[in-house]
Image (cartoon, rainbow, N blue to C red):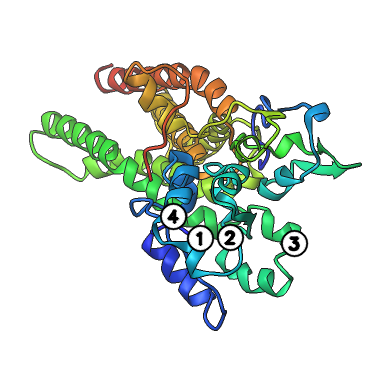
Amino acid sequence: MTRYLLAGHSLVIDEASCNGCGRCVEVCPHEVFAMNDHVARIVSRDTCMECGACRMNCSEDAITVDSGVGCAAALIAQMARGGGTDNPSCSCG
Amino acid sequence: MTANYKLTVDVLRRELGGQHVWLLVLNTKGVNVWCAAGKGTFGTAEVVQRIQAVGLRALVDHRRLILPQLSATGVAAHEVKRLTGFEMQYGPILARDIPAYLANRLKATPEMRRIQFGWKDRLVLAPIELVGAAKPALAIFAIIAIVDLISHGRPTLGALRGFAPYLAAILAGGLVAPLLLPWLPFRSFALAGAALGVVVATAWLWLLPAGLLEGAGLALVMVAIVSFMMLTFTGSTTFTTLSGVKLETRYAVPALASTAGAGVLCSLLALWV
């Protein structure tokens, strides 16, 4: 098992807004994107960990992704404090 | 550019030996690049502020900065360019690839950009899980020791024997599961852990047979321990997602609490029936 549940579930790219800079290909640690005719396309959604590096570095705001730490301990700790399930904060570092 | 996590700075100084480069160290409060980027301390604002604070424009005659790839979740490179005029480029993930990256005219190969999660990486993280399990483990041992004391009127070795299966489950969840990760079934960590827990509990009861109630109690608690530890290992991996963790945590936590509760009930009944 090196592929996770709902991998890349929330990742969306609006190819019409893409300016072809290739920054998403550069920052992605899981080779999710590839350039095709100067447009970035999702070629490996299944390896996406929703870290949000691509969205952060997209100057055209063409990428949306529900990013955050994929850490059950952080999520459980937040739920125990009554903080719900949105944006759990990593507490190790 | 890097974070002021001492280990990282030391590694960079070693790997960059002999290179004609400057190192711009951000104040990330001693936290590593990836975690600081996630928290926002290795972020656009700190990068811009640090460039100005050290007077970088006067210090170097070029306008190019290399960021660690794993800082990209916190830094918007195009914003830094707009605010400071410096061209930003993301270097490789690992410091040891920097010399090859520099020699390759600042081009990273796909291998340098891909995050790995080999057995050594997984093993290094095992102590975090085991240290986290130490307190609950002591609590389990204390309860078993107290029950042993009450039933025998004095402390006996039975307490240690009673604790052994739980210790086995903790080692399975904290050490064996991370090592076996690529070969475990199911995409859900909780399910993968439960599968391993069933194997460990079955092996334990095969080696040291117990009565029906006692055996069921042991097995249920062991499965719950391995599954829960595996679920919390999601935070140590390089590929889990928030969407997936939300989904499985919602189902796994109540399911595992019920499983462990049923196990404890069986064990208690086995004592008095």
Chain bearing tag 4 is B
Mark 2: which secondary structure? strand
Residue at (70% x, 75% y) in the render: B103
> Is residue B35 visible in this depiction of the protein?
no
Please tell me the numbered disc located at residue B212: none
Give the mark nearest the N terminus, 3 or 4.
4
Using the rendered image, report if marks 1 and 2 lie on a common chain.
yes
B114 versus B150 height, above or below: below
Residue matched to label 2:
B65
Residue at (77% x, 26% y) in the render: A14
What is the spatial separation of the Cα atoms under label 2 and label 4, in whole angstroms? 13 Å
Residue at the left extreme of this rendering: B153
Q: Position of residue B200 (x, y in %)?
A: 50, 40
What is the spatial separation of the Cα atoms under label 1 and label 4, in whole angstroms? 14 Å
Mark 1: which secondary structure? loop
Mark 3: which secondary structure? loop
Give the mark nearest the N terminus, 2 or 4.
4
Using the rendered image, report if marks 1 and 4 lie on a common chain.
yes
Q: Residues within 10 Å of mark 3 (few under 14, many from 20)?
A: some
Which amino acid, by three-letter code, is at mark 3?
Thr
Residue matched to label 1:
B1
Which amino acid, by three-letter code, is at mark 2?
Leu
Give the mark nearest the N terminus, 1 or 4.
1
Q: Would you say the residues marked 1 and 2 are in contact, meaning their CB atoms lie under 8 Å apart?
A: yes
Q: Residues within 10 Å of mark 1 (few under 14, many from 20)?
A: some
Count numbered badges in the picture. 4
